[in-house]
Amino acid sequence: MRIGILTGGGDCPALNAVIRAAVKTSIGYGWEVLGIEEGFDGLVHCRTRPLTLASVSGILHLGGTILGTTNAANPFCYPVLENGIKVEHDISDQVIVNFRRLGLDALIVIGGDGTLGIAQKFYEKGVPLVGIPKTIDNDIAITVTTFGFDTAVNTGRDALDKLHTTAESHRRVLVVEVMGRHAGWIALHSGIAGGADVILIPEIPYDLQKVAKAIIDRDNSGKHFSIVVVAEGAFPKGGTLTHLAPKEAGRERRLGGVGERVAADISELTGKEARVVVLGHLQRGGPPTTFDRVLGTRFGAGAARLVRMGLFGQMIALLPPDVGSVPIRDAIATMKKVQLDNDILESARNIGISFGD
Ligand code: F6P
């Protein structure tokens, strides 16, 4: 038995923990493992390398992925330069030819909703594969959580701890923009853990007048500084998302810049000085937390067990108290957003956090 492993989409803390566990488990079963480099692009160009026990030794605590990754190489709409312009082509059949040429019996695909969507299409075309959900955004449905989220939240919380003192010294408003795409999980969890006063998430379009009122009320109560956490996908009531650049062929449009907008509006409405910190890719790096290392290990080993049982088209998921499997199709059918009747939201409101609504 020869299996391939690839990591696709944005990288995420604990990817290496997952790879290590999947490789160790597979080798334990007597299989040969091929690492596919840079996601599905490695299958487009047959860029692979053998993964042995030695290859995965000493990587548990490392951020990133030893296999490399990309979020700009979807074989179903692969970007190709034609007359200097990037256009999208379906080269998925070539990938299937290469899968067979490499002598692979199965594939373990580690990725977020984009990569798992590609995996589902290959499964429907006959490729035996299993999925492992990966994202700092925690937006994949059915699994209770994904590895990487806890580390990203810790990075956000650590930043808020540090920003509190300088905000207080200067009586400023510190606006912290965090990642998460169209889900507010990172903002919500890091905001609560880091003592934010205002949290703006995509699920609750904000009203700047309400945000300003929360800050002025704090000022009047003797708290002359405020911490505002803004998810990159947050937007004002009746308004639009903020993007960094126009859409490029073969990849999602990049979100970013809402923090600047919010800070400028807060200054104008409150008369207070505001500063912006964009945490950006810091949230994707660094050593994974204990939780993510354990979850990554469970997911990696669990996926190899799914292959052994022949449960193709399935994704490993955290379904407490165990990991279990769900169809990839079901997991990618909807995005897991913060529910408005979630007790976390209610508790945050109970302790006085404003959501600007
Ligand atoms: O999905 C993970 C994520 O980090 C999002 O939170 C963010 O919007 C996006 O990826 C950033 O992607 P890139 O690495 O292409 O800038």
Image (cartoon, helix red, strand yellow):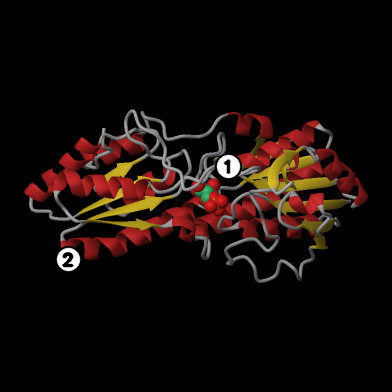
Residue nearest the viewer, comparing 87 with 341: 87
**Residue 232 rendering spot, x and y as whole percentages:** 42, 45
- Mark 2–mark 1 contact, CB under 8 Å? no
Q: Earlier in the sequence, mark 2 or mark 1?
A: 2
- Please tell me whether residue 98 is drawn above or below residue 61 in the rendered image: above
Going 68% across and 45% down the picture, which residue do you hit? 86
Residue located beneath label 1 in the image = 252
Amino acid at the residue labelled 2: Ser
> Residue 179, labelled with which disc?
none
For ligand 1, tell me if the residue under mark 1 lies within 8 Å: yes
Query: In the rendered image, which residue does mark 2 sit on?
Result: 169
Residue 66 in picture, x, y percent from top left: 68, 64
Image coordinates for residue 226, horizontal then vertical, percent: 21, 52
- Residue 136 in sight: no
Number of residues whose C-alpha sits closer than 10 Å to that of mark 1, classed few (under 14), some (14–19) or many (20 or more): few
Q: Is residue 339 left or right of residue 273?
A: right
Q: Can I make out residue 12 in this image?
A: yes
Determine the residue located farthest toward the front in the rendered image. Answer: 83
10 Å neighbourhood of mark 2: few (<14), some, or many (≥20)? Answer: few
Find residue 140 and report its image quarter: top right
Q: Is residue 157 left or right of residue 290?
A: left
| Tag nearer the camera, 2 or 1 | 1
Amino acid under label 1? Glu
Q: Quadrant of the C terminus?
A: top left
Q: Helix or strand or loop: what does disc 2 sit on? A: helix
Q: Is residue 224 above or below residue 213?
A: below
Residue drawn at (13%, 55%) of the image: 224
Q: Residue at x 30, y 61 (%)?
A: 161
